[in-house]
């Protein structure tokens, strides 16, 4: 995978502007990771940051089941049920912290409602895994 910087665009964004997948690679598409525990209960009702942490843990688990990791992710979309930009920023910080130095392109969206009761955060991802052997 190659994360692509766009020198003619602002460097304020905390992610690469594009990513390329170099063949041969297997693409992994995740469903939106939700803030659910193993019993299917929504964790941290009312807490955007708490839900974001659970979402990232669930995303890592789903990626691992597909033989991938956060460092293989080439694109994310982050959904936050809010009308307050501060909630978007708080969730984004959890996402950025989870990815560390790996900064794939991402879209951060404020939405009106998500699928589960009390759900405030969801993250979907696309990863590219180079097969070994």
Image: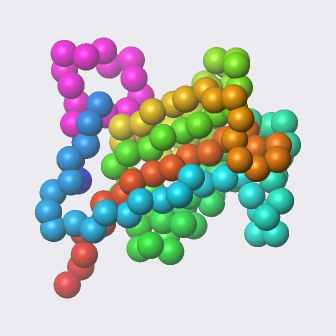
Quarter of the figure with residue 93:
top right
Residue 124: x and y in percent read 51, 49
Q: Residue at the spot x=76%, y=50% of the render?
A: 116
Residue pictured at 22% horizontal, 30% vertical: 5
Where is residue 46, by image quadrant? top right
Q: How many marks?
A: 0
Q: Position of residue 20 (x, y in %)?
A: 20, 47
Tell whether 16 sits left or right of 39: left
Front residue (pair 122, 56): 122
Residue 114 vertical position relative to residue 21 in the rendered view, above or below: above
Examine the structure image and report whether residue 7 is included in the region drawn in magenta.
yes
Residue stretch rendered in magenta on the structure: 4-16
Q: Does residue 62 sit above or below 90 in this rendering?
A: below
Residue 122 visible within the image: yes
Q: Where is residue 123 in the image (x, y as percent from the top left)?
A: 56, 46
What is the quadrant of residue 88 in the picture? top right
Q: Tell me: 99 left or right of 113.
A: left
What secondary structure predominates along the stretch shown in magenta? loop
Residue 72 left/right relative to 61: left
Question: In which quadrant of the rendered image does the C terminus lie?
Answer: bottom left
């Amino acid at each position: 995978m190659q994360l692509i910087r766009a020198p003619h665009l602002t460097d304020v964004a905390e992610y690469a502007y594009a990513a390329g997948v170099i063949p041969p690679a297997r693409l992994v598409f995740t469903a939106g990771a939700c803030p659910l525990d193993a019993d299917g209960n929504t964790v941290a009702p009312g807490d955007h940051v708490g839900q974001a942490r659970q979402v990232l843990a669930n995303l890592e688990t789903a990626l691992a089941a597909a033989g991938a990791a956060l460092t293989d992710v080439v694109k994310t979309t982050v959904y936050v049920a809010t009308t307050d930009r501060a909630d978007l920023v708080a969730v984004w910080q959890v996402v950025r912290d989870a990815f560390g130095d790996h900064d794939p392109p991402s879209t951060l969206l404020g939405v009106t409602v998500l699928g589960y009761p009390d759900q405030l955060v969801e993250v979907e991802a696309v990863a590219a895994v180079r097969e070994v052997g």
